[in-house]
Image (cartoon, helix red, strand yellow):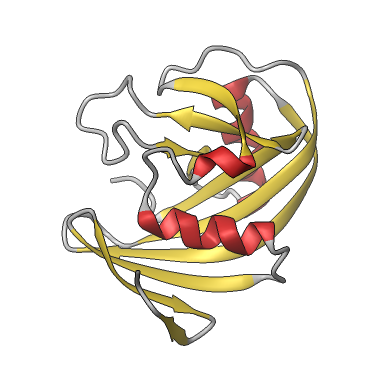
Amino acid sequence: MKSPLTTLCYIERDDAYLMLHRVKKENDMNYDKWIGIGGHFEEGESPEDCLLREVLEETGLMLTRWRFRGLVTFCSDLWPTEYMHLFTADGFTGEPLPCDEGELEWVPKKQISSLPIWEGDKIFLRLLAQDTPFFSLKLVYSGEKLVQAVLDGRTLPIR
């Protein structure tokens, strides 16, 4: 069984994020969605260990500067609860390599919300854009529909 602990990183360059269009794996809960870079913790890893390993494995990039931005708790009636450690990074070496989970693409930040992304991702991407200090965000889904969002203990309106 995979760990319920994950990392996700939005790597920034020239006002764009490196996004992964998940189109290569079958039975992928993120199939056809655009997401950041990340994955599940391995035994004994810290959030930073997992971040660095996953980014290197999925992109070939070695991060040199990053920030731990928040903890996102995903609850769903279809999948087990996941605790995602959210990062941004603006320092790295190397060039993106092909990824076996999907297609990597630098996407201008202002275009991301028009892509097929999870509704809850729009909330934490907005928090990142606002440079919100470290936050805790709980996202509750029924199927693929976001039914509740709680930021730092306060319920947010769902659009």
User: Is residue 46 among what the camera can see?
Assistant: no
How many tags in the picture? 0
x, y percent for residue 94? 76, 17
Residue 58, image quadrant? top right
Q: Is residue 70 above or below residue 36?
A: below
- Going by the image, does 49 lie left or right of 71? right
Image location of residue 55, percent across then percent down: 61, 32
- Outermost residue toward the top in this view: 98
Q: Residue at x 73, y 43 (%)?
A: 89
Q: Relative to 124, is 32 on the left or the right?
A: left
Residue 57 or residue 158, whichever sits in front: 158
64 over 158 or under it: above or below = above
Camera-side residue of 120 and 51: 120
In the foreground, 13 or 94: 13
Name the spot of residue 126 as percent of width and height, x first.
Answer: 58, 60
Q: Residue at x 49, y 62 (%)?
A: 123
The answer to whether one can see residue 23 in this image is yes
Judge left or right: residue 135 versus residue 72.
Answer: right
Tell me: 92 left or right of 118. Answer: right
> In the rendered image of this protein, does residue 88 appear above or below residue 68?
above
Residue at (49%, 30%) from the top-left corner?
20
Q: Position of residue 97 (x, y in %)?
A: 60, 13
Q: Note whether 132 is above or below 8 in the view shown.
A: below
Quadrant of residue 59 within the rendered picture: top right
Residue in the picture at 65% in, 44% down: 49
Which residue sits furthest bottom?
Answer: 154
Split into 4 quadrants, where in the image is the C terminus?
A: bottom left
